[in-house]
Amino acid sequence: TAVLEEQWTLEKLQWKEIPQPPRSSEPATWQLIEKLEAARNDPVPMLVRREVPEPQKFLANSLDGVFGLFLELKGDRVFNRFVRDEGDHRFHFANRKPDVHVFTGLPTIDLYLPPFGIERRGAVVLADRCRDYEYTRSRMTDAFLAESTELLEGNLPYDLGPFLACQPTVVLS
């Protein structure tokens, strides 16, 4: 069922968990469906969301068909720590240029509705650039601070240190 942009709201849509057999090893899975179709046994999903119990194993495999990952950070002052990281993070490698859209201050995953058109490549465009990671030139540029620093491939936490040093320290729980 095609949904119009004005219908792309949590008043019209809902995340519905797909029942799993007892003692199933399959991760919890939800589908985004129209509320009017929720009572049907086989509603047509617009998106599928799956819990990832082993993130390192998941990320080590091909991400074909995946167009978003939701990472929820909890702890004291987490929002204060990462609020400046909202925006488009552009990674420039020799053979690809993936963009990472970072949203801060979002509700829980059950209340989050991805932007309309997210399933179409290039349909969601963020105007605010946060940071460019140019591995081909070994440079990282922060738009907010308007400065660049050396970028060492494979050590992103080390590379981000100077940019994040001015933000409060937080212990994640």
Image (tube, grey):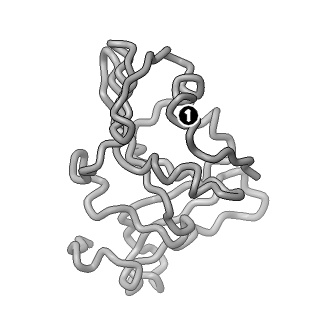
Question: Dot 1, crowdedness within 10 Å: few (<14), some or many (≥20)?
Answer: few
Tell me the residue at 47%/66% (across/down).
31
Tell me the residue at 64%/33% (across/down).
57
In which quadrant of the rendered image does the N terminus lie? bottom left
Q: Is residue 136 above or below residue 34?
A: above
Q: Is residue 168 above or below residue 35?
A: above
Q: Is residue 50 left or right of residue 14?
A: right
Q: What secondary structure is found at the residue carrying circle 1?
A: helix
Is 168 or 10 nearer to us in this picture? 168
Tell me the residue at 56%/50% (across/down).
71
Residue 85 horizontal/vertical position (percent): 45, 46
Residue 129, quarter of the rendered image:
top left
Q: Which residue is mark 1?
A: 59
Residue 121 horizontal/vertical position (percent): 25, 45
Q: How many marks?
A: 1
Residue 141, quarter of the rendered image:
top left
Q: Is residue 108 left or right of residue 85?
A: right
Residue 78 horizontal/vertical position (percent): 63, 55
Is 6 or 50 nearer to us in this picture? 6
Q: Is residue 160 left or right of residue 3?
A: right
Residue 44 horizontal/vertical position (percent): 37, 70
Is 144 or 95 nearer to us in this picture? 144
| Residue type indicated by callout 1 | Leu
Is 169 or 91 nearer to us in this picture? 169
